[in-house]
Amino acid sequence: MTIKSLGMVGRIAIILILALGLELAGNLALEKWQQRELLSADDSRAIAARLVEAERIALAAHPRDRGRLMHEIAHKGMTINWVPRTVISDVSLSIPGLQTIRGEMLQRLPAGGRRDLRLTIVPTPGSAQRDLLGAWQLSDGSYVSFRVSPYMAAAPHPATVLLLHLLLVTAVLGLAMLSVHALVRPLRQLARAADATGQGRAGSFAVDGPPEVRTVAQALTAMQKRLLDTMDEQTNALVAVSHDLRTPIQRLRLRASLIDDAEAREAMEGDLAEMETFIESTLAYFRTGDPEDARLVDVAALVSTVAHSAADLGHDVEYHGPGELLATVRPLSLKRAIANLVDNATRHAGRVEVRLGAIDGDRFSIEVDDDGPGIASADRARALLPFQRLDDARTGRVGGAGLGLPTTLKAMEIARGSLTLDTARMGGLKARIILPRD
């Protein structure tokens, strides 16, 4: 069985086992480090050679001169003395490090283990470290004692040990999180692909990961294709019907102009205008998803143009904002979105203010405020849904197709922006767009 064939549960189990293994290995390494020896095998052999030399000198000299001669051959932190008898006890059997050193030394000393070799540990004077204290029996029964300072490091400070354990846990958790991150990456790709499908786009993702994820990915691929094909068919059919309705509407408009009854003629022309507005709104809503390249434009010029165009048609619309604000946007889509908001405001209010401003170095906002009746907070979410007409919540006048706000919201989602509805300073509705500048 390969890693690729393992399921999600198996992969998570492997990650947990590896994390526990690393934690155990790290703890063992820390434990060994806390009991580290400062005396290497080479040092042990050097001490044995020094003891052999001390025996040669001691046996060739008179006992009264042996102590002085031993002091003269002391070398590199090692003091040597001669004593007829010794009180040093051997504790090497209870300390693994000492036992190893004793074995190294006995291999270099004459007579091997037949002579008495005692090793113990004593505190270093004035330090937290420890010294190696030993005695070796000479061939005449006397002893050469020696002291190596320092031999063993002091026990680490508890805070140091705790810090090292925390670092170990952090490292193990970091590696585990990286592994889990790689494990769930295919799920995030599936989520992005599903989100793209909801916006009418084909999201791309690799069919990879555990078998369960690959199965879901394959099913999502097939479902995505069926869904997008169905959406395209329905969109094309609706657009075709909308286009085909324009010709009979124009014929009916021509015939309505020939009606002598002015009241009936105006009523018919009003109905035809509403039908034409519905068709234009429907086409604009489905055109929002059409691909358009983003480019650097002057958003201030674009927003002010929409506001001034509405004012030229007789509406009370004012623009407030800077004379220039550069941003990389989809200009046609943004212009349609602003026009939808302004048109929605002018249909339901007498006065409209359009405000443009930079939020920070990365974003800017466009606000369309009006003095109309606004939309109740409970109805604002429904107002952003397609074909939801809330004319009774506004002025009661005949509205459009209920696609102005949804069209704007759709354009903002594609452009990584947002659209929110709130209460305006003038008491009506505030529609606020926030977009990135790049």
Image (cartoon, rainbow, N blue to C red):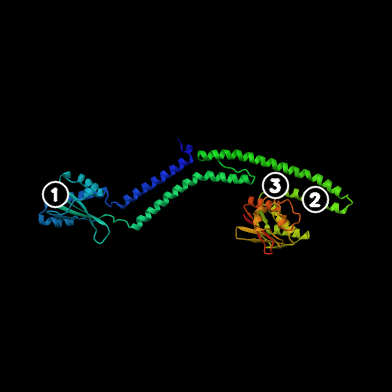
What residue is pinned by disc 3? Answer: 286
Residue 41 lies, in percent from the top left, at 26, 47
- Under mark 2, the amino acid is Asp
Kindly tell me whether residue 305 is visible in this rendering.
Answer: no
Q: Are marks 3 and 2 in contact (CB under 8 Å)?
A: no
Say whether residue 279 is left or right of residue 140: right
Q: Secondary structure at mark 2?
A: helix
Disc 1: CA contacts within 10 A as few (<14), some (14-19) or many (>=20): many
Say whether residue 79 is left or right of residue 339: left
What residue is pinned by disc 2? Answer: 271
Task: Establish if 300 lies above or below 246.
Answer: below
In the rendered image, the residue lying farthest to the bottom is 426
Say whether residue 168 is left or right of residue 82: right
- Under mark 1, the amino acid is Leu
Q: Which mark is residue 375?
A: none
- N-terminal label among 2 and 1: 1
**Total numbered labels:** 3
What residue is pinned by disc 1? Answer: 138
- Alpha-carbon span between mark 1 and mark 3: 104 Å
Q: Nearer the viewer, residue 186 or 226?
A: 226
- Alpha-carbon span between mark 3 and mark 2: 23 Å
Q: Secondary structure at mark 3?
A: helix
